[in-house]
Image: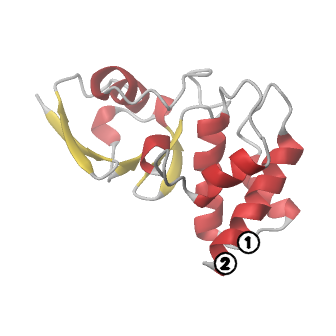
Amino acid sequence: MPTTLTINDTEHTVDLPDTVPLLWVLRDAVGLTGTKYGCGVAACGACTVHIDGEAVRSCQVALADVWGPVTTIEGLGTPDAPAALQQAWIDHQVAQCGYCQSGQIMQAADLLARTPNPTDQDIDDAMQGNLCRCGTYPRIRAAIKSAATSLSEA
């Protein structure tokens, strides 16, 4: 039975089993490949997206369980107008291999939506489930703080 989802403010209808993880709906059925597969058990954060404004691991949310609009990394900004977090990531040269970064940014966006002026501890607590094998954690923290400043000045 077809299911209609709102993804990045656009409706998409997919004809997949209700048990298919949202990650595969996004990547394979809709063609949004910015969300990455990392571990498949919600332990790494690479597949983080927002559902109804909340950061979730898309590898663990079945299609039938999607409860609201989905936002992926592609929905945060555009190449010509990156979101504040995306620009901060660029400015602080956060990415090395880059694989985990879409999940990192989506988790950070959730943090800033809830805590506009996060402390180091707030950042560490919010980001602890997002792993970066390259170890760019100090740059991630700096980028989040920079984006928080940019957003507060806007």
What SS does tag 1 mark? helix
Residue 129, horizontal then vertical, whole percent? 71, 40
Residue sticking out furthest to the front? 80
Residue at (60%, 39%) from the top-left corner? Answer: 103
Residue 124 seen by the camera: no
Residue at (74%, 73%) from the top-left corner? Answer: 117
Residue 89, horizontal then vertical, whole percent? 71, 47
Residue at (58%, 47%) from the top-left corner? Answer: 106
Instruction: Say how the picture is coloured.
Output: secondary structure
Asked if the residue under mark 2 is in contact with the one under mark 1, i.e. CB atoms within 8 Å, the reply is yes
Q: For the residues marked 1 and 2, what is the alpha-carbon distance in whole angstroms?
A: 5 Å
Mark 2: which amino acid? Ser
Q: Residues within 10 Å of mark 2 (few under 14, many from 20)?
A: few
- Residue 149 image label: 1
Q: Nearer the viewer, residue 3 or 30?
A: 30
Residue 128 seen by the camera: yes
What SS does tag 2 mark? helix
Q: Nearer the viewer, residue 31 or 64?
A: 31
Residue sticking out furthest to the left? 1
| Above or below for 28 versus 117 | above
Residue 65, horizontal then vertical, whole percent? 33, 41
Q: Is residue 51 left or right of residue 135?
A: left
Residue at (86%, 32%) from the top-left corner? Answer: 135
Quadrant (top left, top right, bottom left, bottom right) of the C terminus = bottom right
Mark 1: which amino acid? Thr
Quadrant (top left, top right, bottom left, bottom right) of the N terminus = top left
Among the 4 quarters of the image, the one containing residue 15: top left
Among the 4 quarters of the image, the one containing residue 153: bottom right
- Residue 85 image label: none
Among the 4 quarters of the image, the one containing residue 119: bottom right
- Residue 152 image label: 2
